[in-house]
Amino acid sequence: MAETSGDGLTVLIVGATGLVGSHVLQLALEDPAVTKVIAPTRRPLPPHEKLLSPQVDFNQLPTEADWWRADAVICTLGTTIKAAGSQLAFRRVDHDYPLDVARLAKAYGTSTYVLTSAIGADAKSRFFYNRVKGQLEKELEAQRFTSLTIVRPGIIGGKRAEFRLGERVFLHAMRLIGPLLPRQWRVSPADNIARALLTAAISQKPGVHIIPASELA
């Protein structure tokens, strides 16, 4: 098992500068159950006494860094095909990076992995996005973590750093009609997703667990 800091947990967060990841980071830094947070990023994060934030290139992750020793990994890495520029680039961010992190953390003794996936994830889906998400889920199961939790939000609600007009218009419309929709099709607020991720990382329940969008609305 990975080393802990005192009586608390060491949690490694990848994707900590994103919409959901930034919420997870803040919650983890505030939670007394977590005594150390490791957040490898491309750009610096504001300093905090509990935080270690090594600068990394996700295309060439270090394989001999001691900071891989964590009790739990929370992965919130993700992009869109439009933002990535191609299906290949999208797959690299949403599949390859999370799987690389899983393999390295597992090699260093991490027993718990918590993933932000997506509603509709299915390795056999006709839709490329859902298929990539589903393939990652299957490959993470094959890593045989003691505890694996997959969180499948719907449309993620929250204020992003970059402006996406189409997404904001759609989210506004979804909020208006949300009460009329089944819970699984309502907006999943970023802070709700973040709390589900951190709770799973702290509880470390053995086995594979799926948290559907209906529990995140």
Image (cartoon, helix red, strand yellow):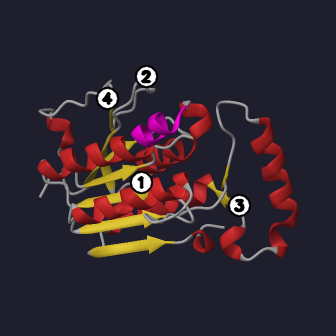
Instruction: Give the amino acid type for the residue marked by disc 2 in the picture.
Output: Arg
Question: Could you tell me if residue 143 is visible in this image?
Answer: yes
For disc 2, the marked residue is 43
Task: Locate residue 17, reporting x and y percent.
Answer: 49, 35
Seen at 42% across and 45% down, the residue is: 29
- Which mark is drawn over residue 156? none
Sequence-wise, the earlier of marks 2 and 3 is 2
Sequence-wise, the earlier of marks 3 and 1 is 1
Q: In whole angstroms, how far apart are the C-alphas of marks 1 and 4?
A: 31 Å
For disc 4, the marked residue is 59
The local crowd at label 2, few if under 14, some if 14 to 19, many if 20 or more residues have their Cα within 10 Å, is few
Tag 2 near tag 4, CB within 8 Å = no
* Span of residues in magenta: 86-93
For disc 3, the marked residue is 187
Question: Which secondary structure is most common in the magenta stretch?
Answer: helix
Q: In whole angstroms, how far apart are the C-alphas of marks 2 and 4?
A: 15 Å
Instruction: Give the amino acid type for the residue marked by disc 3 in the picture.
Output: Val
Number of the front mark, 1 or 4: 4
Q: Is residue 84 left or right of residue 205?
A: right
